[in-house]
Image: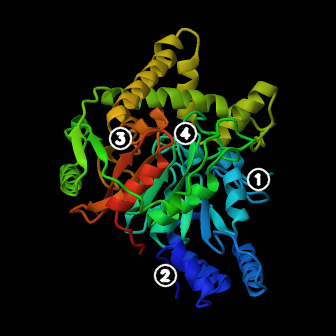
Amino acid sequence: MYSHKSIQQFLSGIEEQTIDCTSVVKHYLARIEEYRHLNAFIDVFADEALTRAAELDNKKKKGLPCGKLFGVVVGIKDVICYKDHHISAGSAILKGFTSLYSATAIERLLGEDAIIIGNLNCDEFAMGSSNENSAYGNVLNALDPTRVSGGSSGGSAVAVQAGLCMVSLGSDTGGSVRQPADFCGVIGFKPGYGRISRYGLIAYASSFDQIGIFGTNIEDIALLVEIMAGPDEYDSTAARKPVPAFSQLLKDTKKFKIAYFPQSLAHPSLDPEIGMAIRDHLKMLEKEGHTVEPVDFELLDYIVPAYYILTTAEASSNLARYDGVKYGTRTKELVNNLDEFYRKSRSQGFGKEVKRRIMLGTFVLSTGYYDAYYTRAQQVRRRIKEQTDLIFKHFDIIILPTTPAPAFRFGEKSHDAVEMFLADLFTVFANLAGIPAISYPLSKHSNGMPFGIQAMTNQFEELSLLQFSNLSCHPSGTL
Ligand code: GLN
């Protein structure tokens, strides 16, 4: 039976012919079947994955050149386009829709011989923190099925947690890769804004969205970022910066200058066990020769409101295209005019949370409120960015908790939207500032659930973030 340690080790097995792509794909398909109750996958591309595996095995036999991700089994969040495959962003409004093209990130993975095994459940249009907002139902945390997987990329986190694929892709607008990774005991990495093309990623809030990666070790993540990153003629926000060979450079490390915000560790919402574990981790880093210093960051209480004003504003505009004409399912009811047609199609197609956000976003952009909400939130974002730039003049790394508490139970927060929003306190910071961020597993709570810690670097400093994480994080196991 195959058990995934790292892509490198898998590729050695392929090289030494102790395994082949077909048997490994069969292994994952059997596991997906065994763990179907977790509801991680929306679609499994079983036949296609087997055909591709057979083609790859053939290619190998013929001695043809193999890609860097030869046979690597990848799951993708249901917001990333894969040509001729179903995509719905976890929404009823897009049920049955087929991608007309592949995201640049997907093209690059396929170009290196990866195998896409299926698309993964998520909160509708990536809005949520618990995967309770999906038209396909909840994703269960494999460590305790009474608890949430986190969100919005819950399916992507559980797919790696339960060993249903080797690595997976998610999207992170305000923590949707890092928070579910934390809840599931795996690694979640969000590159800085502009590192990976967003072409083919269904938009939630375009100035925040980034494709991110889930894995069980830093090497795998570094390799995937390296392959997917870089300029793209289809996305003008994809930076023209050269992409370092992240996976080759992980071991070239130095001593880091680490900042932490005492306000975050003293925050009333932070579980004391998590606070304690982070303090211990910081002490350990100091012992290992890194510099660790507190930094005052007084904007902490403004980041959640700024995030939710700006992202809902962008979402209200981005989601205008799902009108039953351009995109999306149409109402079957008889209507009297176009306005009623739009209203019915959208009311029937969108779920509750998405409607809430479209209304909130429309409100903050409306005449008379624009300056009071939207403009002010933009000003807060600018100040956050300036303060962050200042911190990175003196430090390499910022450490924050990933989440205030470990995975909660289904229904525990879904009755109170504000409570759910506030739990994004520590993750939205990196998206507001546009910087790379990672969550890696730190410890286990006395309630039995894992939790992680979050590290961030300056924009385009993914390399030092991966190097730092490689030093301080131990590979996480799967089930
Ligand atoms: N929980 C956050 C939200 O609901 C983050 C979502 C995300 O990163 N896609 O907006």
**Whole-number angstrom distance, CA of label 3 to CA of label 1:** 33 Å
> Which quarter of the picture shows residue 349?
top right
Looking at the picture, tell me which residue is in the foreground, 28 or 477. 477
Identify residue type, mark 4.
Tyr
Residue 99 drawn at (x, y percent): 76, 53
Identify the mark nearer the N-term, 4 or 2: 2
Residue annotated with mark 4: 193
Residue annotated with mark 2: 3
Identify the mark nearer the N-term, 4 or 3: 4
Tally the numbered discs: 4
Residue 411 drawn at (x, y percent): 39, 51
Marker disc for residue 99: 1
At mark 2, the secondary structure is loop
Identify the mark nearer the N-term, 3 or 2: 2
Crowding near the residue tagged with mark 1, few <14, some 14–19, many ≥20 C-alpha atoms within 10 Å = some
Q: Is residue 445 above or below residue 103?
A: below
For this view, does 131 lie left or right of residue 394?
right
